[in-house]
Amino acid sequence: MQPDDQNQQSPASQPAQNGYVSPSGADVPEYLHMEAVADPVEFGRKRRKKRRVLLLVAIAVIILIAAAFTAYWYVEQNKPQERLYRALESALSVKYVNKKTTYHRDGTGKGTNVEVNSIVDLSDPSSVANESTIVFSRQIKRNGAIADDEYSMRLVKRTKLSLYIESYSGETDLNGLDKKKWIVGNPIKGDIDSRLEEFDASAVLDGTQLVPVMGNYSDATRSKIINTIKSSGMYKVIDTASKDVDGKPLTGMRVGVDRDAINKLNKMIATEAKTGVTHSLLKLVNDTNYEDITFWLNDKNTIVEVDYRNRLQNEDKFRIINSVVFSYPDKVDINEPKE
């Protein structure tokens, strides 16, 4: 074979100039050169896969947005101020409450101590009823001598205010108060026997009058009260604390006291509930320059305790310490005296 023959190839073995070789090796006309046809089954599978990926991405984005919103809402709703507002609003739908109060006021000697156990019917805000058992003791100076007084009494308030002296021992003149006899007054008409003030009756009836408003109010009145509380800023949380009571965690919200705002609120409530009587906080005396309230809430944002304290200027010792523990029975019975 000649060298030139070795370099020559048959037409069938030579690639076509356009790069296409037919299966048979024969030249194919250019107008028949076509791209490969896609498999419709495979094409559908790829398109469905792409849609699933896009759907999963969209769902993931929605979940992330929802989770971020939920986390933000949870943080906002669990801020101390918001929790306290919800607790105060919940207190405006209370029908019955049991209040156990311990009250101490410093003075000469050991001061004044009061323990009160009250059941209160708040189902009708215009006619609140309560029944209390009270132990009242004090040590004071009278004419340069120490006088120790102790009383045990029962107090009932429904249509009228009635106080019954169970027992008494001491040296202080009771201004004609008789043991085993009811003293009657009408607080709605402002007729409260001055002798009742001997027992700090206002503190007994209404605590320090700084405890939260409680009652079974209508939706409109409840909304008006909570809006007034929020707009006046009377219960702004200063700081928080925590403690366990009977194995249950409580969160404390300490707030400052705005007496003017509280008095305006009490006046508005008296008008709305048609009680005919307004409880006003007296101005502080004796250079008292520090006072606060701590609301203790359980995990359901229910107020279960309220502590109040104040002290005199340039003194570390508290002048008044008052603590009220709340429980909420389903029903109470007020036993009015029979005359």
Image (spheres, rainbow, N blue to C red):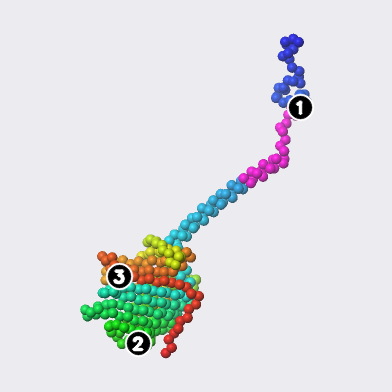
Q: Main secondary structure of the magenta part?
A: helix
Mark on residue 179?
2
Q: Amino acid at mark 2?
A: Lys
Dots 2, 1 in contact, CB < 8 A: no
Secondary structure of residue under mark 2: loop
Q: Nearer the viewer, residue 294 or 15?
A: 294
State which tag comes first along the sequence, 3 or 1: 1
Q: Nearer the viewer, residue 289 or 335?
A: 335
Instruction: Return the residue at label 1.
Output: 23
Please state which of the two labelled residues, at mark 3 or mark 1, is closer to the viewer: 3
Q: Nearer the viewer, residue 170 or 124?
A: 170
> The magenta stretch spans which residues?
30-53
Instruction: Return the residue at label 3.
Output: 319
Q: Residue at x 27, y 66 (%)?
A: 315
**Total count of labels:** 3
Answer whether residue 167 is visible to the viewer in this image. Answer: yes
